[in-house]
Image (spheres, rainbow, N blue to C red):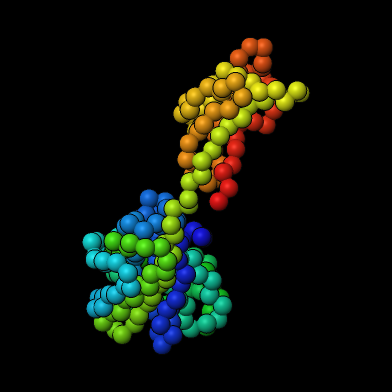
Amino acid sequence: MGDVAATYALSPSRRGAMSVSVPSDLNGGRSEFRPGDTVVLAVNTSAPVTTKWNSAGAMDRYGVSVEETTDYILVERTRSVSLSGWPSGPVSVVWLAGGGSPTTVHRREIFIRDEVLGLLSATYETTRILYRLRNVRAAGRVAVYFENADGESASEILEFADEPEAKEVWIVVQDIDTRAAVEGCAVSVDGVHVGDTDADGRVYVGETAPGAHDLGLTPPSPYLSQSEDGIANDRFTVPQ
């Protein structure tokens, strides 16, 4: 999955007029979701939301998020330019270079009286309406849909994935030259001591999630410590 665990789609009749996203800052930095997780959705719109729908769980509104945004826009002899977001209040437009032509703002558009060259800044507040998607019980795709009072709509497809299946893991410690079993080596995984190796150089770790894990080894004398032996033996990977 990408930075957001979703693909993006909007109503073709009013494309770009309304949007819905899954912002990582409102989801604890997560970009992947499992069944049972609560997902925060942010709806950007200039009109009240009238319809909300999803295909798999419960969805409710629980707040708003207000942010100040500044756009820097290069004007190249055009009579209008677009803001990157939906302003929820007044827009302050300042010519930073060139330009100088009077401007007016309507919705997301800045209209410029004359055809000029210049750089302007537009500062405004944007309001995101926040919803929670909850109680998704099974892995798969979940569609969400929103519509506002202006007839604009936005939809999104969220991907919910099952937890990867854990695997049973044994660690085997051997002499690097003779391949003889090393008994009595203390073993830790991800900072947790799991046991000491037996006469066969083995210790049972238990069920371990797929992915990379830290491995700590404290061997008996005369073996060097893990930090001194120069061997790449401080991590292991459990396959999917």
**Spot occupied by residue 220 in the image (x, y as percentages of width and height):** 60, 14
Say which quarter of the image contains residue 203.
top right
**Spot occupied by residue 146 in the image (x, y as percentages of width and height):** 32, 76
Q: Is residue 138 left or right of residue 226?
A: left
Is residue 51 among what the camera can see?
yes
Query: Which of 97 and 239 lies nearest the eye of the viewer?
Result: 239
Say which quarter of the image contains residue 160.
bottom left
Query: Which of 94 and 21 lies nearest the eye of the viewer?
Result: 21
Q: Residue furthest right?
A: 177
Q: Residue at coordinates 33% horizontally, 62% vertically from top-left?
A: 137
**Spot occupied by residue 194 in the image (x, y as percentages of width and height):** 48, 28
**Spot occupied by residue 156 in the image (x, y as percentages of width and height):** 40, 72
Is residue 67 among what the camera can see?
no
Q: Is residue 105 left or right of residue 96?
A: left
Q: Residue furthest front?
A: 199
Q: Is residue 130 left or right of residue 79?
A: left
